[in-house]
Amino acid sequence: MYIKNQTPLTNEQLAAVSPSIMADHAHERVSNRYSRVSTIDVVDNMRELGWMPVRARQMKVRTEDRLGFCKHEIRFQRMGDTTLSKVGDETLQAVMTNSHDRSSAFHFNLGVFRLACENGLMVAMGMFNEVKIRHVNFEPDDISMMVEGIAEGGKKVAEHINAMKAVALDNKEQEALARASLNLLFDKEELQLMELPPQKLLNPRRYDDNGSDLWRTFNRIQENVMKGGLRYYVKAGDEVNSKIRRATTRQVA
């Protein structure tokens, strides 16, 4: 389970919640072609770059021999970037997934997360950078370069988000952005047969997304597009036997 706080975790705390993080060799079932990525070495590297581990967990396994090698996840955060003072606040985090038994590739995501409730549950708002490496035929320097790229990318993402928050949009500008999103979601012929007002993409699904700045407008549109469920009407049949039917936008996988 997650350690429910946002303070840096020591190696002892990481080992307690996820023993696989500390593995110094791969599981015996892997082949000679398997290239191990040392999780704790990456953790130390991230610390040197200013990113501290704040949460960790590992998957449940059926056999005890995999407990110290199975898939695990660590979340990193730059201390002082965002204060989670209330529900709805945002934080920039890097999420690393790894294993030492072939159950997972080495995977790194950089994204924005939001505190969803008081017990520490975090929900993803958007992923901005992603790296995935198979445990086969790679050089240790590749991992170091990738980690440095993720860490540096976080600074740029934070600057970009702050810039978006500083841009205020009026109603017409918000609607124009939503209409442009519909043009990306459907082709021209489909849109001609549909009755789906752009305003539906602007409706907030949670209170904290209310606002007229570019960042909140972008988040409302993105969530409505990605999660689907928007009801609309569409014309069917020819000009003589045309009918109007109800439809719902699909979730984007």
Image (cartoon, rainbow, N blue to C red):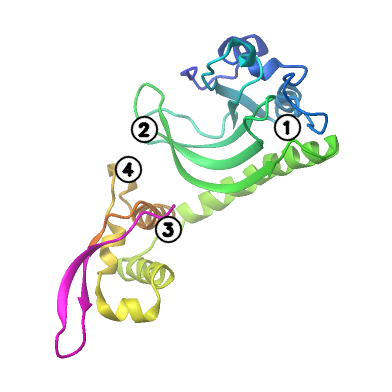
Closer to us: 146 or 246: 246
How far, Cα to Cα, is label 3 from label 1? 30 Å
* Residue that mark 3 sits on: 214
Which residue occupies 68% across, 39% down?
A: 151
Of labels 2 and 4, the one closer to you? 2
The mark found on residue 116 in the picture is: 2
How far, Cα to Cα, is label 1 from label 2? 28 Å
**Element class at badge 3:** helix
How far, Cα to Cα, is label 3 from label 4? 14 Å
* Residue that mark 4 sits on: 208
In the rendered view, would you say 44 is above or below 177? above
Q: Is residue 132 magenta?
A: no
Residue 83 position in % (x across, y down): 48, 30
Residue 121 position in % (x across, y down): 40, 27
Question: Which residues lie in the magenta part?
Answer: 232-253
Which residue occupies 78% across, 31% down?
A: 34
Closer to us: 48 or 68: 68
Q: Amino acid at mark 2?
A: Ala
Residue 66 position in % (x across, y down): 63, 16
Horizontally, residue 7 falls left or right of residue 42, namely left
Which residue occupies 39% across, 54% down?
A: 226
Counting residues from the N terminus, which is met first, the one under dot 4 or under dot 1? 1
Of labels 1 and 2, the one closer to you? 2
